[in-house]
Each structure stands twice: as C-alpha cells, then as structure tokens.
Amino acid sequence: MYRLMLYFLLALWLAAILFGFTKVLLYNPFDILASGLFLIAICNITNYLFSKVLGARTKPESASITAVILTLIVGPFPLLENLPVLTFIGVASMASKYIFAIRKKHIFNPAAAGVFLSAVLLNAGASWWIGNIPTLLFIILGGLLILAKIKRFGLALGFLAVYFLSTNLFPAPPVWFFVFVMLVEPLTSPAAKNKQVIFGGFVALVYFLLPKIIPGYGYGLETALLAGNLLNAALSVWVRFSSQI
C-alpha cells in the first residue's frame, strides 16, 4: 500500500511539473521540483533522526509520502525565499508522528498536522494547489486504485455523502485529493467498515460546520481531518479501556 501510494503521488508530482512546463498549469515547474526535492530530503532526515533517538520502527516510504503530499498542497513558491516555512512544515509533520502518538502509533495525519501548525503559527497553510481541473482525472483514477488496495470505499463514500448533502455541491478537485490521499490513511482512520462510514461523515460534517462557527476560517480540510483523527484515537482508547474493565 505504501509503495502504491508513493508511486501515485510521484506520478502526480511529475505530471504537475510537466503541466507547468507546457503551461497547462500556471505554476513555475522549477518551484514545484525544487520544493519537492527539499521536502523529501527534510522529511526523511527528520524522520530518521526521530526514529533513531526514540528507537521507533518506521516504514521506509512513509516520510517520502508525507513529503510529496506537502509538495502538492503547499505553495508552490520559490524555494530559497521560503526555506524557513518549508523546513518548519516538513519537521512539524514528521515530529507529529512521534510526539502525538499512542503505543507508537501516530494519532494525526502527518501532512495535515504540519500544514495546520504552519497555518496557526506562521500564517502559511495549505493552498491545495494540486486540486485543479487538469489533474482531476489523474487524482480520481489513482485514488480509486488506492481505495481498492486499502479497502476504504466506505470511508470515502461516508465523507462524500455528507459533503454533498450539506453543501449540495459537487466536490471541488482539492476535496478529491484530500479524500483519496489524506482522509483514507489507514493508521489514522478506523479499520472496521461501519466505523469508516461514520468517520468519513464526521470529518465532512466538521468541514461544513467550521466556517459557520468561525467565519472566514480558511483551513477547513486539515482541521476537519485532525478532528476526525482525534475522535478515532479517543474511541480506540475507550474501546481498549472498556475491554479491560
């Protein structure tokens, strides 16, 4: 699953770079390339250091997956002018896996945690730039392969159903990327199929309610996912506690 996700994200990254060169996307392809290479480096270095210091086992592909996700949702902007922001986002994403963890299992989606912290502390959150019409077909096709592999169709459908019912809108391209790549992360979402539907619906509901509770709030997707991750972790702890009573 990790390799499939990494290959999908790398293909999407390379497609975005190509679209930049051909002017299909109005982004600087060199910014996309440079920021991606930097984030891959900083995420892997940080992840390696944390794992060695804490004696934790980690999947070889996990840091690169987070790095490419960050590349596709942050910016894209010139690398040298934004090194502090990119460094913070990369380090914060990796650190969240080890700081916010229960029994060596991270609670929050690392990429969502990194961009949320950057938004709150540096006022530099995710732009979700990869979500656009030229890349939408790639996102959907790759996303369906991911869902088939990890068996999270119920989770995605739960989110999309509540999203549509609450907004009466067809999901925008950034939402599709969010659902297929970040929402369905196995370690931070329920394993049971019935709980997956509830989890997806809960995240969609939080996303819908956030701008109504906090007018003008611009970080709905990542905040809603973190809320869902927290709920999932709390319920998991409660189930284990109840079984021991």
Image (cartoon, helix red, strand yellow):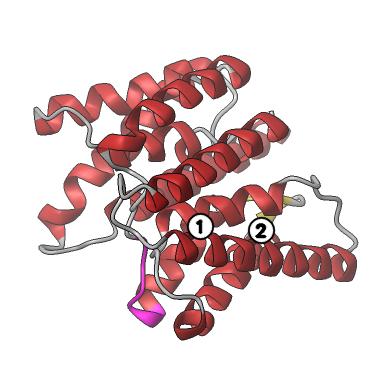
Pointer 1: residues within 10 angstroms few (<14), some, or many (20+)? Answer: many
| Front disc: 1 or 2 | 1
Question: Compared with residue 231, is residue 102 higher up or lower down, i.e. above or below?
Answer: below
Question: Compared with residue 123, is residue 10 higher up or lower down, i.e. above or below?
Answer: above
Q: Which residues are magenta?
A: 121-126
In the image: residue 106, left or right of residue 182: right
- In terms of depth relative to the viewer, which is nearer, 27 or 220? 27
Q: Using the rendered image of the protein, determine whether residue 54 is visible from the camera's viewpoint.
A: yes
The image shows residue 140 at horizontal and vertical percentages of: 40, 25
Q: What residue is drawn where x is 47% and y is 60%?
A: 32
For disc 2, the marked residue is 97
For disc 1, the marked residue is 70
Q: Does the magenta portion include 156? A: no
In the image: residue 32, left or right of residue 63: left
The image shows residue 187 at horizontal and vertical percentages of: 63, 39
Q: Amino acid at mark 1?
A: Leu
In the picture, residue 172 is in which quadrant? top left
In the image: residue 163, left or right of residue 123: left
